[in-house]
Image: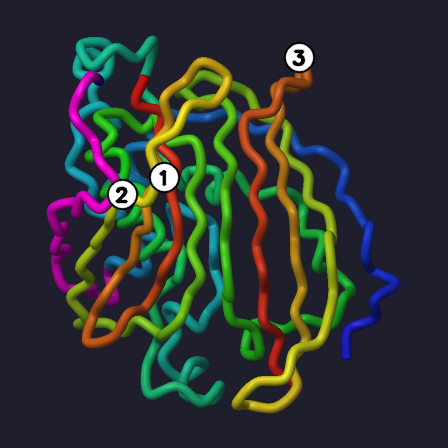
Amino acid sequence: MIDRSHIGRTTEPLVLDVERGHIARFADAIGDPDPIYRDEDAARRAGHPRIPAPPTFATALRPRDVRAGMGITFDRVLHGEQGYELRRPMYAGDRVAVSQRVADIFQKSGKAGVMDMCVFETTGVDPATGEVFFVGRATIVVKR
Amino acid sequence: MSRDVNVGDRLADLVKEPITRTQLVRYAGASGDFNPIHHDEPFAQAAGYKSVIAHGMLSMGFLGQYVAAWAGSPARVRALSVRFKAITWPGDVVTCKGEVTAVRSEGGRRLVDLKVWTETSAVTGEGTATVDVS
């Protein structure tokens, strides 16, 4: 089982740029055809100051990995749940400081036996003002 | 956005193109999720799956597209949460569906809560979204 003493571990903030090419590649991968993700004029015509990030783009702003050293390997994990509070829209050109925290670790009995559940909370803030862009909560299922 | 929104309204379905392995590689690159279970067939099979599996976050991305289009802007989407219920495979056609569950006021804003879900032959993810329609 995963040691509950990891709860509360938090990574140092990592400052990332929201890049327009990255937004376009992300929208391409999803197959979202909205031109606002690729064309600055289209974005402005739709009322945006610059090219906006799609709603789930926060997942592409990866913090330093708080899971390092927790004994979680790729072949045993499933993404159980994901939530985002989107407090302030992100636009190309923004800088975001992302950090990740181990919010909870608990056990759950399911069809496949007892599994460890880990909740990781990722926060993205404006590094200049501390204003929050997003809070993400990922619940990861770790099979034994 | 001034429009008539009522509890119980169904959103028009969004039917996505069939998921391809190339799409999973593109999503891995764009999102930074390089878990080999999504692109490395021998690794996925050794882990007990019949093939690579789609990122849950790809389906959540589809729901992001769906909700932003309904809202008229990604900047209006205030919250999005999904519980992943079944695996999505290459070749699957994902359909996004949604329904209005609440229309409310908060802090002077008019907010709409949606129930949203993704389906293949089964419901693969279900969750909620909050949209600012002020």
Residue highlighted by disc 3: A128
Q: Secondary structure at mark 1?
A: strand
The residue lying at 33 percent from left, 32 percent from top is B103
* Tag 3: amino acid: Ala
Q: Position of residue B14 (x, y in %)?
A: 14, 50
Q: Residue furthest right?
A: A5
Range drawn in magenta: B2-22
Seen in the image, is B16 located left or right of residue A83?
A: left
Q: Position of residue B28 (x, y in %)?
A: 39, 55
Discs 3, 2 touching: Cβ within 8 Å: no
Up/down of A17 relative to B90, above or below: above
* Tag 2: amino acid: Val
The residue lying at 16 percent from left, 26 percent from top is B4
Q: Is B107 in front, or is A27?
A: B107
Residue highlighted by disc 1: B113
The residue lying at 12 percent from left, 58 percent from top is B17
Discs 2, 1 touching: Cβ within 8 Å: yes
Up/down of B50 relative to B94, above or below: below
Q: Mark 3 belongs to which subunit?
A: A
Q: Is B96 in front, or is A95?
A: B96
Up/down of A43 relative to A79, above or below: above
Examine the residues drawn in magenta and state their main secondary structure.
Answer: loop
Picture quadrant of residue B56: bottom left
**Quadrant placement of the C terminus of chain B:** top left
The residue lying at 17 percent from left, 47 percent from top is B10
Regarding residue A2, the answer to whether it shows in the image is yes
